[in-house]
Image: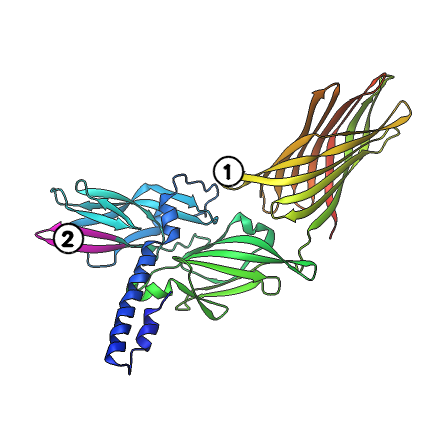
Amino acid sequence: MCNSIDVLCCFKNKSFTLKIFFISLYFLCAFQRQLLANESPLIQETILDSLPRVLDPPAGINIKNYEVYWISKAIPDFSVQFVEESFEWVRLKNRLAIPRARLVIKSSSRNKENGSVYYADKVYPFQDEEIEVPIALISNVQNQVQIKIYKNNKWQEGKIGIRFANSQQLKNIYFDPSCANYSPHIDQLNVEGWAYVVCSLQVARRKEKSFPNIYLKIFWDQSIQEVQKDLKSQNSLFLNDSLVEAEDVSLWSIGLTSLQSKLNLKSFNQKEKWTISFNLPEQFHLGHFGMGLGPYAYTLQDGTGSVESFVPLVTLYFSYSLAEKVRLVSFNATSIYRNPTSDLGVYLLIDQFEFLDQKVKFHLLLGGHSLFFKARNQYYTRFSLPQGFELVYKNFLKERTNLGLGGFFYPVISGRSYFNLWLRWGGAHFIEFNFISFQEPMETFKVYSKSMGLSVGMPLFDF
């Protein structure tokens, strides 16, 4: 983007033709800057999103934290205010949570007004003496509402802005749940506005090793002090003492590595500052191996009788990332008993979609499994292709702990069946309820087995 200040720096000691060129370029840059402000993707998405869906919005922020003010001289007989019940949060595609509301612009004149309101490339013509306009609650001087009224045989224009009013009860810095796995920490907090931070992980490969990189989206809604001076200050900040311009209104994208996981942020006037740090592993492991152990109610029927007992059951878990949304997973469940059964499955786990404000993931499990069991003093092996799914509710009850519900299903076909259901809660360490049953027809008899119990799981090693 061209910078009109840089253009003026080149103006001195130039010929008349070059001066005309630089003057034209100056106004072109000023026009471009205003055009980009009007076409802010962040503002556009905030007001156009038809389905607000933020289940856990930043606590403490409401319509009372914002006020409307005139950037220009106020238009006589006009008043502006928020519709209080219209306050709501919107989740954007990049996971940012931004508030919006409706603004009422009203004329005290009883005559029908001739004119329109302009906001975010939209025109709202007056129908009567008042009009409602959806607006993103962003206290940035580029977030302007423009009014044009034809009155007394002349055009009158005015500009309205939004200002954030700080509250001592606010947390000020809010982290999206996507940051929970990286243990964010805040130091040296001195912020009058508020900020929302979104995290995303990208793995870089170097010399056959994987290293984690975190990309941050930081929306920093700074307070407005002096309107004319805040245009640049609200869209620039010092990042580790380097001046960085915003990619959109009050929005910055920043990358971090395990070698540099700490950021010092200061406002342009250096009156507001905060430090953010993350706990990143030096190396990212694609593979994980874990185990679980617990008591299970065990049943085995082979036509000669029925065995029912409580037995220890060992579960093994394997996972290896093949792509961003595809993992190779395997599990094994083995009962420790004189008539043991063992269940080994190998599957592709595919992330299909997310819903409920991206809190719940749906995984598809495609693959097969083999059964190993003992019946009538002989050992048998059977293979089948039960397919399954898993629903995972992220950060359930506490951060870095998930609630998972899933199962594999092979309905009764030619006397064969298989069901494996689980309910798991936790992170690296977890508690899991399991129900596993199968039915296998043999030549002269039928085998039925059922295991149901609770396991405590833990990680063994990563690779």
Residue farthest to the left, as pictured: 153
Question: Taking 35 as reference, is 158 left or right?
Answer: left
Q: Quadrant of the N terminus?
A: bottom left
> The residue tagged with tag 1: helix, strand or loop?
loop
Instruction: Give how far across and how far down residue 273 sits, in percent.
Output: 46, 64
User: Is residue 152 covered in magenta?
Assistant: yes
Q: Which residue is mark 1?
A: 356
Tell me if residue 322 comes above or below residue 312 in the rendering. Answer: below
- In magenta, the rendered stretch is 146-160
Residue farthest to the bottom, as pictured: 13
Inter-mark Cα distance, 1 to 2? 46 Å
User: Is residue 141 covered in magenta?
Assistant: no
Instruction: Give how far across and how far down residue 278 sits, in percent.
Output: 58, 58
The one of 115 and 461 positioned closer to us in this rendering: 115
Q: Is residue 115 visible?
A: yes
The one of 435 and 213 positioned closer to us in this rendering: 213
Name the image quarter holding residue 295.
top right
Question: Taking 296 as reference, is 271 left or right?
Answer: left
Instruction: Give how far across and how far down residue 383 sits, in percent.
Output: 77, 30
Query: Dot 2, how many residues are within 10 Å of its Cα: few (below 14), some (14-19), or many (20+)?
Result: few
Tell me if residue 163 comes above or below residue 439 in the rendering. Answer: below
Q: Residue at x 30, y 52 (%)?
A: 67
Q: Which residue is mark 2?
A: 76
Query: Dot 1, how many residues are within 10 Å of its Cα: few (below 14), some (14-19), or many (20+)?
Result: few
Residue farthest to the right, as pictured: 377
Closer to the N terminus: mark 1 or mark 2?
A: 2
The kind of residue tagged 1 is Leu
Instruction: Give how far across and how far down residue 214 sits, in percent.
Output: 57, 57
